Amino acid sequence: MRQVHCQNCDKLIETKKDLFTTQIFFMVQAYCKQCYFDKIKKVSSLAVSNTPLNGRYSNFLAGLTFVGLILVYFAEIEYIKIPLILALSLVLFMRIYSFVRFERHLPF
């Protein structure tokens, strides 16, 4: 099993409860609980998302995005269909990438 380390302090993250993944310039990075609340939670901009990708809100958002993808697929307006599918897929891809890269390697 692969080890997950904090991006800021290089501390070993041992459980999913201590892991916080964030999106910074389309890169998903892992942080420990302490570093997330000290450094990342205070910052919010277009480049830095202060909402963790592995939280309940992000799981809910991924579910809504999946439903949105299905609805857009059956939309009648062709010129908006492709850009919406790409944008919604990006949100869903970031959540899946966070799980595959970091979360699946940690126990509960």
Image: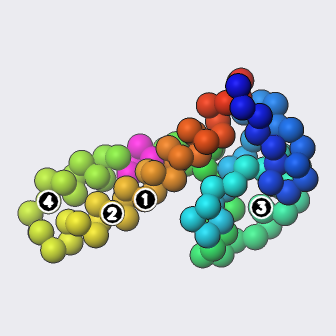
Sequence order check, earlier mark of 4 and 3 = 3
Given this view, does label 3 or label 1 mark the residue nearer the observer? 1
**Left or right of 28 on screen, residue 84:** left
Amino acid of disc 2: Leu
Q: Residues within 10 Å of mark 3 (few under 14, many from 20)?
A: some
Quadrant of res 18:
top right
Q: Position of residue 84 (x, y in %)?
A: 29, 65
The reply to whether discs 1 and 2 touch (Cβ–Cβ < 8 Å) is yes
Sequence order check, earlier mark of 1 and 4 = 4
Find disc 4 in the rendering and name its residue.
75
Q: Nearer the viewer, residue 54 or 103?
A: 103
Amino acid of disc 4: Ala
Find disc 1 in the rendering and name its residue.
90
Q: Secondary structure at mark 4?
A: loop
- Main SS of residues in magenta: helix
Q: Position of residue 23 (x, y in %)?
A: 63, 60
- What span is colored magenta in the figure? 61-65
Sequence order check, earlier mark of 3 and 1 = 3
- Quarter of the image where the N terminus is located: top right
Vertical relation: 45 (above or below) 28? below
Find disc 3 in the rendering and name its residue.
41
Residue at x 77%, y 61% (from the top left corner): 41
**Left or right of 45 on screen, residue 74:** left
State the separation of the CA atoms marked 4 and 2: 14 Å
State the separation of the CA atoms marked 1 and 4: 19 Å
- Which label number is shown at residue 86? 2
